[in-house]
């Protein structure tokens, strides 16, 4: 195992790596002397950017989720046909990073060619140096509203590609507003929400809408998320903290949205159905459900808006003819639909527990003391679902998820334009996989990363995007090969009315 700092020496050439340190000089008026203008000189071509040392650097590798991302990444390091040949772990503590690598490699010995790099999100030069050393940075440091922007800024400035696993809408939308143009200019591909938020939702809703073969069209799709375990379900404290801070700052998200130009929404056939009851019983899947204010609906909507502006998807830098055909065929089969997410449970008691957590967060997060209580005692206010120590390895192994996508629409698009029209067709699909935070999230993130490494020429040059619009044509097959399944449950003709 190699050790280095963010200002480390290249072990091959033994010369300091260049980093984008900021330099400042005083204006000439401060010296009391008039400075002569320098003579005009001919511009010289910029030297080519040095080849990065690493394919991937995982930032926050020793965190709760980060260590599982390391474990997943090691499965593909230097394996046949894998584009991942060089890897480094970055964080604030060398000791913790070394222990993470040992834990992730167990029962094998830690690979000798994985480097450890000291870096901190509050140390901007260290972030700049990270970006200069890698093709792709995987950011696992949350909450992202607190720690994320310096990392995105460093990547956007340097041209380094960036993926993260945030589920925080305000952070994602703010990064798009601030850094999209810069990232397009430098060739930095910045993609958030590459974990359980929001890969299963994005790929799942697109899988559902692709089942609507012309002349059939979808009108709306609802995802029902069911978390299951032989033991108890325990979540990461950082996820809980992000939820508390997100609800507390909802007004800032609304202000951000009002400050930006409104983009046109996709045209969806038929009227939008009225809201249903607070607690719904979905008979077809045997679950009771409650609306879940998650990032998934926001991310899917952003993907559909981008798709409306680019009906054949986003072209790559130097895309192969085969991939152009694949991309255009894929996106021509994806259809817009209203989308929402509900958290589901087999028991009414489970729904009341979820409702109780929502009430606690909704009431207490309005006040600083209330937020302190929520974050100080997460296990109490979440009825044991979140705790600062996170789940045990047994609890992770025993957990799984099912995500049901119930779509309503019209067997013929002409029916949607009729007055008082109601959906006459239902298609139910399902996505299933292992535990959401520490298994499905690393699988999703690492598969997105491998697509970036192996197909960079087929992807957009740069910009801030959602995962669906970037990885859509290639990701589902990879997820299926790594333990996340997609299947069609039923296709049904409906009576003259559709459920709300």
Image (spheres, rainbow, N blue to C red):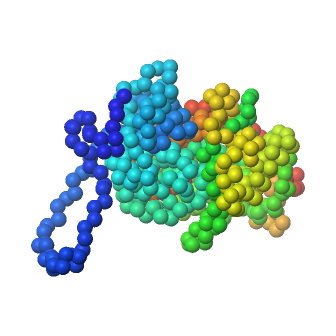
Q: Quadrant of the C terminus?
A: bottom right
Question: Which residue appears at 53% of the width and 62% of the height?
Answer: 174
**Left or right of 488 on screen, residue 68:** left
Question: Percent from the top left, x then y, of residue 237?
Answer: 63, 43
Taking depth in this image into account, of 178 and 326 the one nearest to the observer is 178
Q: Is residue 403 visible?
A: no
Question: In the orientation shown, which residue stands out farthest toward the front?
Answer: 369
* Whether residue 27 is situated above or below residue 335 in the rendered picture: below
Q: Residue at x 19, y 75 (%)?
A: 31
173, 211: nearer the viewer: 173
**Residue 394 higher or lower than 364, as above or below:** above
Number of dots carrying numbers = 0
Query: Picture coordinates of residue 384 (x, y %)?
Result: 74, 40
Q: Is residue 330 visible?
A: yes
Residue drawn at 43 percent across, 47 percent down? 120
Task: Answer with the quarter of the image where residue 56 lies.
Answer: top left
Give coordinates of residue 336: x percent, y percent: 65, 57
Q: Is residue 71 left or right of residue 281?
A: left
Image-based side of 383 in relation to 479, left or right? right
Q: Residue at x 58, y 44 (%)?
A: 195
Question: Dividing the image into 4 quarters, which one contains the N terminus?
Answer: top left
Give whichever of 272, 65 is nearer the camera.
65
Q: Position of residue 166 (x, y in %)?
A: 57, 49
Decide: is 85 above or below 277. above
Image side of residue 235 versus residue 360, left or right: left
């Amino acid at each position: 195992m190699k050790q280095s700092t963010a200002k480390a020496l290249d072990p091959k050439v033994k010369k300091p790596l260049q980093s984008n340190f900021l330099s400042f000089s005083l204006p000439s008026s401060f010296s009391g002397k008039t400075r002569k203008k320098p003579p005009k000189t001919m511009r010289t071509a910029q030297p080519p950017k040095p080849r990065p040392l690493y394919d991937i650097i995982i930032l926050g590798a020793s965190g709760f989720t980060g260590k599982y991302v390391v474990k997943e990444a090691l499965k593909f390091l230097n394996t046949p046909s894998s584009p991942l040949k060089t890897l480094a772990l970055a964080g604030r503590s060398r000791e913790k990073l070394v222990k993470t690598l040992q834990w992730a490699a167990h029962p094998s010995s830690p690979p000798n060619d994985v480097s450890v790099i000291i870096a901190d999100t509050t140390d901007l030069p260290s972030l700049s140096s990270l970006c200069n050393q890698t093709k792709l940075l995987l950011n696992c440091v949350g909450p992202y509203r607190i720690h994320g922007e310096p990392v995105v800024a460093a990547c956007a400035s340097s041209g380094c590609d960036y993926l993260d696993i945030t589920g925080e809408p305000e952070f994602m939308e703010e990064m798009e507003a601030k850094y999209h143009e810069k990232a397009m200019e430098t060739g930095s591909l910045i993609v958030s929400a590459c974990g359980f938020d929001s890969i299963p939702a994005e790929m799942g809703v697109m899988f559902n809408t692709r089942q609507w073969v012309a002349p059939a069209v979808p009108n709306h799709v609802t995802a029902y998320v069911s978390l299951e375990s032989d033991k108890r379900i325990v979540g990461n404290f950082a996820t809980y903290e992000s939820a508390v801070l997100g609800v507390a700052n909802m007004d800032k998200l609304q202000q951000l949205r009002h400050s930006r130009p409104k983009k046109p929404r996709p045209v969806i056939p038929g009227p939008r159905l009225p809201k249903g009851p607070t607690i719904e019983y979905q008979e077809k899947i045997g679950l009771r459900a409650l609306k879940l204010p998650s990032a998934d609906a926001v991310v899917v909507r952003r993907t559909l808006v981008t798709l409306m502006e680019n009906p054949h998807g986003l072209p790559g830098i130097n895309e192969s003819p085969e991939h152009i055909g694949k991309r255009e065929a894929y996106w021509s089969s994806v259809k817009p639909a209203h989308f929402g997410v509900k958290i589901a449970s087999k028991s009414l008691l489970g729904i009341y527990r979820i409702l109780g957590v929502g009430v606690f967060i909704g009431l207490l997060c309005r006040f600083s003391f209330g937020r302190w209580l929520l974050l100080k005692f997460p296990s109490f206010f979440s009825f044991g679902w979140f705790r600062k120590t996170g789940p045990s390895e047994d609890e992770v192994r025993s957990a799984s998820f099912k995500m049901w996508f119930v779509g309503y629409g019209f067997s013929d698009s002409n029916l949607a334009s009729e007055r008082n029209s109601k959906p006459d067709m239902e298609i139910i699909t399902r996505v299933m996989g292992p535990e959401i935070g520490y298994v499905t999230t690393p699988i999703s993130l690492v598969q997105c990363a491998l697509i970036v490494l192996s197909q960079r020429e087929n992807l957009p040059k740069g910009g801030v995007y959602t995962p669906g619009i970037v990885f859509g044509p290639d990701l589902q097959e990879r997820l299926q090969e790594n333990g996340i399944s997609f299947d069609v449950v039923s296709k049904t003709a409906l009576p003259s009315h559709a459920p709300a």
